[in-house]
Every structure is written in C-alpha cells, then in structure tokens.
Amino acid sequence: MDLKLDHHSKDGIEIVDVEGEIDVYTAPRLRELLIELVNSRFYQLVVNMEKVEFLDSTGLGVLVGGLKRVRAHDGSLDLVCTQERILKIFRITGLTKVFGIHDTVDEAIAARRAEK
Amino acid sequence: MATVELTFTALPAHVRTARLVATAVARRSGVDESLLDEVRLAVGEACSRAVEGHQLYCPAEPVRLALTDLAGRFEVEVTDTCAPGARSPGGPGTVADPAGGWMAGADAGVPAGLGIAVIEGLADDVQISETPAGTSIRMSWPLAGADR
C-alpha cells in the first residue's frame, strides 16, 4: 500500500502517525512532513511506526535527517515500533543506538518527560 | 535462463513493483516464508540503488531484475547500466548520498553504502561485480528443504 501520514499533538509532543510503505518513492513525503513540522517549531517528535509495513534505507535516511533537524533545536525524535521486520533493519544498521525506540506512544512520551 | 526477468524504467515508483514481483516469485519457488521479508527488503535496496544511479547518470536506460530458481537456491540479480567510470569515486553505493553521510547535513539522505550494507546483512550470499557496462548485485537464499 501507499504511504499515509498524519500528525497530532499529545502532551506537548507532536505524534506523527505513519502507515504503509516507506521506500525510495514515498520517503520524500515523510521528509517533507518532518521539515514542515520543524519549520512550524515542533521540536519534540514521536514517529509512530506501528502501521508501517515496509521500511528501507531511504526511509532510515529520512528519519536520521529528521533527528538531525530537531536536535539542532535541542529537540528529540523518538520512534514507536514493535514489529520485528521493521526493527531488524534498525539493528542491522546499528540505528537502535541512535533512536529511542519504544513499544507505545505513551511510553515514548513518558520516556521523553523523564529525560527533561 | 532466469525463471522471471523484469526490466523497468528507472523511476522510484517502480521499485515497489520489483519488490512485489520478487517476493511472489520467491514464494512460488519455495523460499521459506520466514525469509520472504529479507528477500523483499534486499531486492528493494538493490533496485533503489540502481534507480538512483540511473537517474543521475543514465535515466533513459532500464534497470534489470532477474529471478532464478536454481539448484536449491533462489537467486536474484539486479543489474544497472551505469558504467563505473560515470560514477563518483568510492565504488558501489556511493551514488545516493549527495549530502555526505549520516549526520552531515539537515537534509542528510542515505549514507554512502548503507543500501549495500543492508543487503549484505540480509542475504547470506551476496556478490557485487562491476563490469564496463555497469554493476550487478547477485544475492541468493536457500529454498525450503534444500541443504544450505
């Protein structure tokens, strides 16, 4: 399926819901959304990937680009993902050490609050 | 002769089609269900890399995907026709990273060679060969019931 993107605020953190496939074709749309959010001064982001069916290295590049952007404003970009098929690519590339990866959105928000 | 051969215009939109075809042929050839996600991701990475290279250096040329069920293994070969001399230095995987790597810039894209690294992490047999005509990535997986 194609990529569906949505976002909403929760407890002062912007939650980005991603559904579908993030690949070389669709990743630019996610990149644009992350840039748009940062430009709108949303610097605390949680990307919910529970409904992502496919993620490749292009998608990883976009997430890392987003992380770089929010960090420039002392912000954060955490991920929500429990799917083994998606987590595997984070492990292969060593990115589990770069991103905070949580089981639920609430857990990601709580972890972010605890760090403040 | 390949079991199924596909050539496609070097556009990102067609990479998904290539993934779907490769996964369907792998399943039909007898690749274990537990390996199909790896096949799908590795084929996607190889095709993405080829498409990005073609878009930079030879957009009119198609990318070729060959899927072969042979001697207990399912083999995939993705061939681009970007002559090595036309690429920027650094060998396979270097074409997709104009931003220069992981955290190099706010728009940092795919780091150099990440796609190749992912492929090598997924397929248990990968061969990358450069010829005067371009680069070929060949990878294979065992068929269910075959000796590994």
Image (spheres, coloured by chain):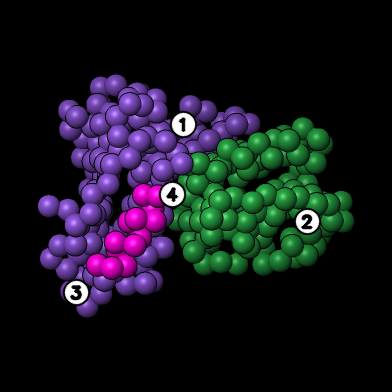
Q: Residues within 10 Å of mark 3 (few under 14, many from 20)?
A: few
Identify the secondary structure beneath mark 4.
helix
Name the front one of labels 1 and 3: 3
- Of labels 4 and 3, earlier in sequence is 4
Give the labeled residue for mark 1: B97
Q: Determine contact: label 4, label 2, CB under 8 Å.
A: no
Instruction: Assign a secondary structure to mark 1.
Output: loop
On the image, numbered disc 2 is attached to which residue?
A112
Q: Residue placed at 53% from the left, 35% from the top? A: B109
Looking at the rendered structure, whether the residues under marks 4 and 3 are on a common chain is answered as: yes
User: How far apart, in angstroms, are the residues tagged by discs 4 and 3?
Assistant: 29 Å
Which of A14 and B15 lies nearest the eye of the viewer? Answer: B15
Q: Residue at x 18, y 74 (%)?
A: B147
List the residue tagged with mark 4: B16
- Which of the two marks, 2 or 1, is nearer to us in this view? 1
Q: Residue furthest right?
A: A11
Q: Position of residue B54 (x, y in %)?
A: 35, 30
The quadrant in which residue B91 appears is: top left
Q: Chain letter for mark 3, please.
A: B
Please, what is the three-letter code of the amino acid marked with disc 2? Answer: Arg
Chain B, colour shown: purple
User: Which shade of the palette goes to chain A?
Assistant: green
